[in-house]
Image (tube, rainbow, N blue to C red):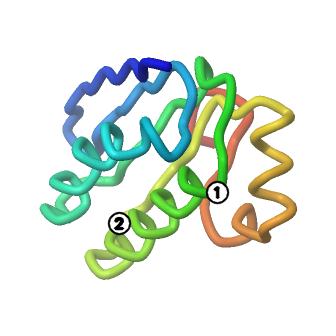
């Protein structure tokens, strides 16, 4: 499965729109986008998963690593547009309590 990734740079945050499936085969593509952003540490990151149909634990791991890196720079990670199915992954793992996860596509 291919992964579609679009990025937009705003004044205070990076917007990353993802489409497709996030799994062991496709997560490295998203990692290639997120790692430079999180290493820079100058902006929050908003990841829109509205068009992601599937995500496994490898995807969750990428977001945990991104959150840890951003926390070192006092920046935030927002996971937006999550489906019920993906939202449950964040709930079950307890990650919903550690990061901003929103079913809507706007930061609350």
> How many tags in the picture?
2
Residue placed at 46% from the left, 39% from the top? 47
Disc marking residue 26: none
How dense is the environment of label 1, judged by Cα within 10 Å: few (below 14), some, or many (20 and up)? some
- Which of 63 and 12 lies nearest the eye of the viewer? 63
| Residue annotated with mark 2 | 75
| Element on which disc 1 rests | helix
Quarter occupied by residue 74: bottom left
Q: For marks 2 and 1, give the CA distance.
A: 23 Å
Residue 104 at what x, y percent from top left? 69, 29
| Element on which disc 2 rests | loop
Mark found first going from the N terminus, 2 or 1:
1
Q: Is residue 20 left or right of residue 88?
A: left
Please identify the residue farthest to the bottom as the structure is shown: 72
Q: Is residue 9 left or right of residue 31?
A: left
Residue 90 at what x, y percent from top left? 75, 56
| Residue annotated with mark 1 | 57
Q: Is residue 95 above or below residue 49?
A: below
Residue placed at 65% from the left, 40% from the top? 55
Residue placed at 51% from the left, 31% from the top? 48
Q: Is residue 15 above or below residue 6?
A: below
Q: Nearer the viewer, mark 2 or mark 1?
A: 1
Residue 93 at what x, y percent from top left? 78, 67
Q: Quadrant of the C terminus?
A: top right
How dense is the environment of label 2, judged by Cα within 10 Å: few (below 14), some, or many (20 and up)? some
Residue placed at 39% from the left, 18% from the top? 4
- Which of 25 and 78 lies nearest the eye of the viewer? 25
């Amino acid at each position: 499965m291919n992964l579609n990734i679009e990025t937009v740079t705003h004044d205070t945050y990076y917007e990353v729109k993802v489409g497709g499936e996030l799994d062991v085969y496709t997560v490295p593509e998203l990692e290639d986008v997120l790692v430079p952003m999180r290493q820079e540490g100058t902006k929050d990151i908003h990841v829109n998963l509205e068009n992601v149909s599937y995500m496994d634990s490898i995807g969750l791991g990428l977001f945990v690593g991104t959150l840890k890196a951003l926390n070192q720079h006092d920046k935030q990670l927002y996971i937006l547009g999550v489906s019920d199915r993906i939202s449950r992954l964040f709930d079950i793992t307890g990650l919903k309590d550690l990061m901003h996860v929103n079913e809507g596509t706007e930061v609350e």
